Amino acid sequence: MRARVPSRTLLPLPLWAALLVSALGGFVYDLGFPGASVWPLAFVGIAMALVSLIGRSSWAAFHVGLVFGLAFYLTHVSWTSLYLGPIPWLALSILESLFVAGGAVLIALAYRWMPRATRSRWSQLVLLPLLVAGLWVLRETASGTLPYTGFPWGRAALSQSESPFADVVSWVGFSGLSFVMVAIVAGVIEWVRIRGWRDLRTGIPVAALLVVAIVVPSWQTSPTGKLRVASVQGNGPSGYFDERSQGDVLAAQLDATEPILDEPGVDVLLWPEGGSDIDPTRSADAARVFDDLSERLDAPVILNTVTIDEEADEERFYNTSLLWKAGEGAVDRYSKRYPVPFGEYIPDRWFYEAIVPELTGLVQRGYSPGTEPPVFDLDGTVAGLAICFDVIYDGVIWEGARDGAEVYLLQTNNADFRGTDENQQQLAIARLRAIETGRSVVNISTVGTSQVIDPSGRTIDSLPAYEAGAMVTDVELRTGITPSVALGGVIPTLIGFGALAGLVAAGVRGGMRNAPRRSGSERGVDGGTAT
């Protein structure tokens, strides 16, 4: 005998409809991110994902979640196939979708177990949405950590860089904003399921969370002055497969820098990732070039190049930013903390060479992760650093702020993703980092889009993509630590452990409450236990 679904809730979707809604939801979710940039659609996509999981058995939920993940990631990271073909794109999308599928199983269990654990209407309206949001963030945290340092791209929060919700990140970070987004959506779903319009008081919890999330201002850090930053986008042949000779990228950067060499009062010259294809620490000619730039501007130069540690047990390569001063050379350095797996190095090369040797052979040298602090001291002004995809890893940004960064100087090279949404997605992350830390951000790319962003997330200077150019911008300096930076990893840890504990508690309590009434013939919508 099929268990009766309580009359106070709306029936779940049949499995075939759930699969269709989930697939469409993945595409809609992507439209909320930079590219289409219709940020409200991120909420719609989340809603479609959650509605599809209500009433599902674990096995059905896995497939529903997998469909949502594939629809989202195959679209969202399609730029990974631009030069390397479909295999890396498919492999990454499938891997991330498996994480989504695993998270979907946990969320489906929450929808199944929580109503068993308590019959309270307010528990359904408050505790269940919070539990679902926590499990969503737990999945985001897991996929952003594992394997090979993870891939924290596509988190819900990253869709909101230009929305009224963006200021939330200064209080609770990216994980906290994702939690708030999903909690709002899950709360609305439960309000609809119980036909909350019959008693408008039932809408108070989700309405209150929504209002707070929109109205709360960003945490205000303290202005301490300004830094005059010259930043240069050379638009040189800096892509992995671009045809070039040694020195061509350096020459393009020099040409784009020439018009600003007579600008007065420049405090630092910033070049992008890969801006010099010749290491000035190993080339006297290149060293003279940077000495001349520093001397003409009477300012240090921050450049990026490939450096080699020949004193290690084996030769090691690093993606390195150098702080260069005329007559002194490289006075400080920072090497990329998180080299990109399968792009900048091949993890477990022996294994992947046995599977796809034609692709692993394209990455001949592997970059090692750096260990230096992500800050440079610019004659008394501390600048926080991140190289390309370093910006998506929370710890690098938090460390810079805690080490006294008053501004962030971000270097990237988007040349391998020309004509795609990748640079816009990365720029949105940089904009959220400005709000999260309460700091100005200079995001300079070899090919664009390059922008200067103030602590509120507003663009104050920019260069168009795929054109050479330079900016000289007076950038506001700030001090002070936002709650997001102060709490750091505490937030995703508390959310993750809290969600798991809540799920287990719901399962145990629900099992105890329903044990006397349980019948072996009772089956759920997809063949699971009745909800």
Image (cartoon, rainbow, N blue to C red):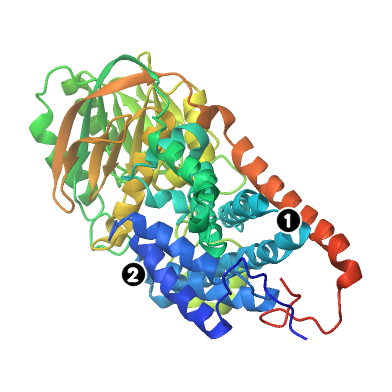
Query: Which mark lies nearer to you, 1 or 2?
Result: 1
Q: Disc 1 residue type?
A: Leu
Residue lying at 19% horizontally and 27% vertically, measured from the top left: 473
Front residue of 269 and 123: 123
Q: Compared to 360, does 343 lie above or below?
A: above
Q: What element carries label 2?
A: helix
Q: Compared to 98, does 381 lie above or below?
A: above
Q: Compared to 243, does 165 lie above or below?
A: above
Front residue of 132 and 500: 132
Percent position of residue 189, x then y: 52, 60
Q: Disc 2 residue type?
A: Tyr
Q: Which residue is disc 2 drawn over?
A: 83
Q: Quadrant of residue 210?
A: top left
- N-terminal-most mark, 1 or 2: 2
Q: Which residue is disc 1 drawn over?
A: 503
Q: How many residues crowd around disc 1 within 10 Å: few (fewer than 14), some, or many (20 or more)? A: many
| Residue 233 visible in this rendered orientation of the protein | yes
Front residue of 168 and 461: 168
Q: In which quarter of the image is residue 528?
A: bottom right
Percent position of residue 352, x then y: 57, 72
Residue lying at 19% horizontally and 42% vertically, measured from the top left: 253
Q: Is mark 1 on a helix, strand or loop?
A: helix
Q: How many residues crowd around disc 2 within 10 Å: few (fewer than 14), some, or many (20 or more)? A: few
Front residue of 422 and 10: 10
